[in-house]
Image (spheres, rainbow, N blue to C red):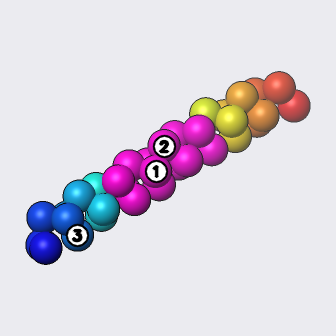
Amino acid sequence: MVEIIKKLCEIETGKVDRWKSMYRSYSYVYSNST
């Protein structure tokens, strides 16, 4: 049971990290274009 929760947490943090990196690169490009 604990392993399943750990895996779910890993997946969720992975999603968050991907969104963060996407947002970071997008805001970087946006700030450079203006």
**Is there any visible trace of residue 24 in the rendered image?**
no
Which quadrant of the figure has residue 2? bottom left
Disc 3 on helix, strand or loop? helix
Asked if the residues shown at circle 1 and circle 2 are in contact, with their CB atoms under 8 angstroms apart, the answer is: yes
Name the chief secondary structure element in magenta.
Answer: helix
Seen at 76% across and 36% down, the residue is: 31
Residue 19 percent coordinates (x, y): 55, 47
Residue 1 percent coordinates (x, y): 13, 73
Seen at 61% across and 33% down, the residue is: 25
Q: CA distance from mark 1 to mark 2?
A: 5 Å
Question: Furthest-right residue in view?
Answer: 34
- Total numbered circles: 3
Decide: is 23 above or below 26. below
Amino acid at pointer 3: Ile
Amino acid at pointer 2: Arg
Amino acid at pointer 1: Lys
Seen at 59% across and 39% down, the residue is: 22
Q: Along the horizontal axis of the image, is 8 left or right of 20?
A: left
Residue 7 percent coordinates (x, y): 23, 58
Disc 2 on helix, strand or loop? helix
Q: Which residue is mark 1?
A: 15
Q: Is residue 13 magenta?
A: yes
Question: Furthest-front residue in view?
Answer: 1
- Of the two numbered discs 1 and 3 on the same chain, state the one appearing first in sequence: 3
Decide: is 32 above or below 2. above
Sort mark 1 into few (<14), some (14-19) or many (20+) by Cα contacts within 10 Å.
Answer: few
**Is there any visible trace of residue 14 in the rendered image?**
yes
Q: Which residue is mark 2?
A: 18
Q: Which residue is mark 3?
A: 5
Disc 1 on helix, strand or loop? helix
Where are the magenta residues, as a range?
11-24
